[in-house]
Amino acid sequence: MSRVTRNTLGVSKSNENNIQVTKNSNIPVPSKRKAEEELKKESKTRKRAAFGDLTNAQAEKQQSGSNNIKNQVKKGLNNFVGKGKNTLKGKDSKTAAKKVVAKVKDEVEVKIPELGTSSSSEEGLLCTLDSGESSNDVTIKEEEEEEKFFEIKEEPRKVPPKGVLDFDLETLGDPQQHSEYAMETFQYYKDRESAFRVPDYMNAQMEITDVMRGILVDWLVEVQESFELNHETLYTAVKMTDIYLSKKQVRKEDLQLVGATACLIACKVDERIPPMVDDFLYVCDDAYTRDQLMKMERKMLSVVGFDLGYSLSYRFLRRYGRVCKVTMPVLTLARYILELSLMEYSVNVDVSESEVAAGCLVLAFKMKGIKGYAPTLAYYSGFSLSDLSPMVQKLLAMMQKPPKENLKTVRSKYNHKVFHEVAATTVPTSVDMTTDE
């Protein structure tokens, strides 16, 4: 018997419940009785019943609604289960057959209402019944999975001792202050100080002296002022220069090239709009070529490494000034002392940046006669007055030196009204470090 496929079976869109045969089809439609006889023969000869297989005669039964489809499916289920019974034995076979029938019937009952008016109900039914796992089973499996919750225990916030101002609590709602993580951030800076501590390298240099280094730093301050760079850029450049000089021999004619290259790299780290290479060649009075500067940049990065997140004393000073709530003139005086210390070789080797920053602030307090800061500074910096006494004495000796003619950029800078003319502040002959009262 020639089987009528979907290509020859036309479905009328006007009446979805009635299935008609196109007039152009040359294949005759078998009668109802003949179709049933052929169906019986086919079920006997085939090895396994085609589950849900629909013939043309069965398609005509769809005119009476979805009940005929259910009956046909049940008939196919009986054939399918009947085959399965032959392979099973005893009570287990009956139980297994019942489970198969119940499961498949549930799936059919759920899917058939959706196929009642569809012109492609046969394909939808076949796809549903042939699928290995229904969407209901997937949903049940997802619901059965145990939900796992991961809870991160938040450590309680550290509270300063009695008598110490809780600066971070006061500024907790200000996103600019970074108050929630400020203590952890500056502790991280302190932990990284040892990784970038500069050893005493000047004895290993054949042509460079500490005086020449001081002149270079004074020139870098002038470059920072000319390009209006951030103070962090200046301190990063000086730190990078010291690290490079501690690892490589440098000729005196190349010392300015080292400083300019360090400033160029620092600008790329801290500046939003860094100066161009030609700008650095200009401030060097064209003593070097572009190729020399670019070659020195590659060499310096290979020597000092690409980890340029140094623990800068300037950042520590700004933090300590905030927690102690100092006025701007007092903080500017401390910044002036700290910037002068950049040119002092002994204050930049084998020292802690946080200790230098705390010592500069204490000396500024002593010069201005400010008292009552010791508990707060000790809590946030980790240094007591006795710990800072050697550093303060060293900075005081530096301030008492007469100004040199070739190192006047920092003093002239902080003599301006913008910086509250702090460079004109009288330097005491001695300071008492036993108390802050």
Image: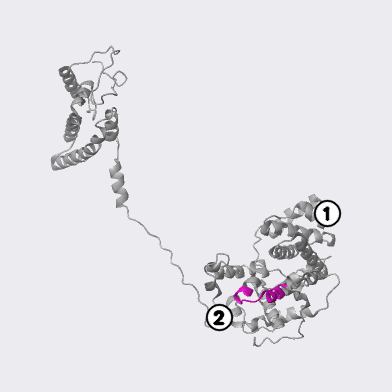
Among all residues in the image, which is located at the extreme left?
Answer: 90
Please name the predominant secondary structure of the magenta segment in the image: helix
Instruction: Choose top left, top right, bottom left or bottom right for residue 280.
Output: bottom right
Is residue 333 on the magenta stretch? yes
User: At x 67% / y 69%, what residue is drawn?
Assistant: 314
Residues packed near mark 1 inside 10 Å, few (<14), some (14 to 19) or many (20 plus): some
Q: Position of residue 275 (x, y in %)?
A: 74, 55
* Closer to us: 373 or 12: 12
What amino acid type should be assigned to the residue bearing mark 2?
Answer: Val
Picture quarter with the C terminus? bottom right
Q: Secondary structure at mark 2?
A: loop
Q: Secondary structure at mark 1?
A: loop
Q: Identify the disc placed on residue 164.
A: 2
Q: Identify the disc placed on residue 288.
A: 1
Report the number of discs: 2
Q: What's the image's color scheme?
A: one colour
Q: Is residue 113 above or below residue 162?
A: above
Q: How far apart in space, not on screen, are marks 2 and 1 (Cα)?
A: 54 Å
* Closer to us: 157 or 243: 157
Is 66 left or right of 134, judged from the image as shown?
A: left
Instruction: Choose top left, top right, bottom left or bottom right for residue 265.
Output: bottom right
Q: Position of residue 211 (x, y in %)?
A: 82, 70
Instruction: Choose top left, top right, bottom left or bottom right for residue 11.
Output: top left
What amino acid type should be assigned to the residue bearing mark 1?
Answer: Tyr
Q: Which residues are magenta?
A: 320-335
